Image (spheres, rainbow, N blue to C red):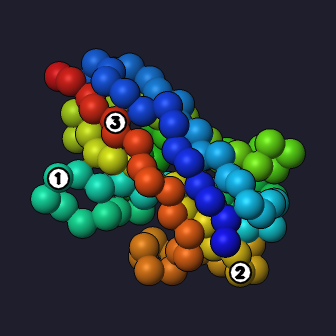
Amino acid sequence: QVQLVESGGGLVQAGGSLRLSCAASGRTISTYAMAWFRQAPGKEREFVAAVTWSGTITYYADSVKGRFTISRDNAKNTVYLQMNSLKPEDTAVYYCAADSGSGTAWSREPIFWGSWGQGTQVTVSS
């Protein structure tokens, strides 16, 4: 089982930027599809972005398209989420997720993803 640890969250003003990192250990994630989800208080966990094993294909929720960028460095066993033009509605706990299947399959549904990190808080003030 791969272990995932998120970092990089914090408090930022609207319009600002943050870069989240997800460091994997225990197994290499170079063949895994990876994703970021987020969960705001009182809301369900929602899909943010996903990337295939090679990093060449990415997917985004409409709400973050054009503002967030998911990327990965397989040599460092790490996935990133660059978040620009942040809005107060982006406030949530952000989670990293991994799927050890084909490396190209992905889903917006949390149940698809087999491994999760503990999350990192992102708070955007207005």
Q: CA distance from mark 2 to mark 1?
A: 31 Å
Q: CA distance from mark 3 to mark 1?
A: 12 Å
Label 1 neighbourhood size at 10 Å, few (<14), some (14-19), many (20+)? few
Q: CA distance from mark 2 to mark 3?
A: 29 Å
Label 2 neighbourhood size at 10 Å, few (<14), some (14-19), many (20+)? few
Residue 62 shows in this picture: yes
Q: Earlier in the sequence, mark 2 or mark 1?
A: 1
Q: Residue furthest right?
A: 75
Which residue is the site of mark 2? 101
Q: Earlier in the sequence, mark 3 or mark 1?
A: 1
Q: Quadrant of the N terminus?
A: bottom right
Label for residue 41? Answer: 1
The reply to whether callout 2 and callout 3 are in contact (CB within 8 Å) is no
Residue 112 horizontal/vertical position (percent): 51, 80
Label 3 neighbourhood size at 10 Å, few (<14), some (14-19), many (20+)? many
Which residue is the site of mark 3? 122
Q: Circle 2 sits in a helix, a strand or a loop, which is it?
A: loop
Q: Residue at x 50, y 56 (%)?
A: 117
Q: Residue at x 49, y 31 (%)?
A: 8
Q: How many marks?
A: 3
Q: Amino acid at mark 1?
A: Pro
The reply to whether callout 3 and callout 1 are in contact (CB within 8 Å) is no
Residue 13 horizontal/vertical position (percent): 28, 18
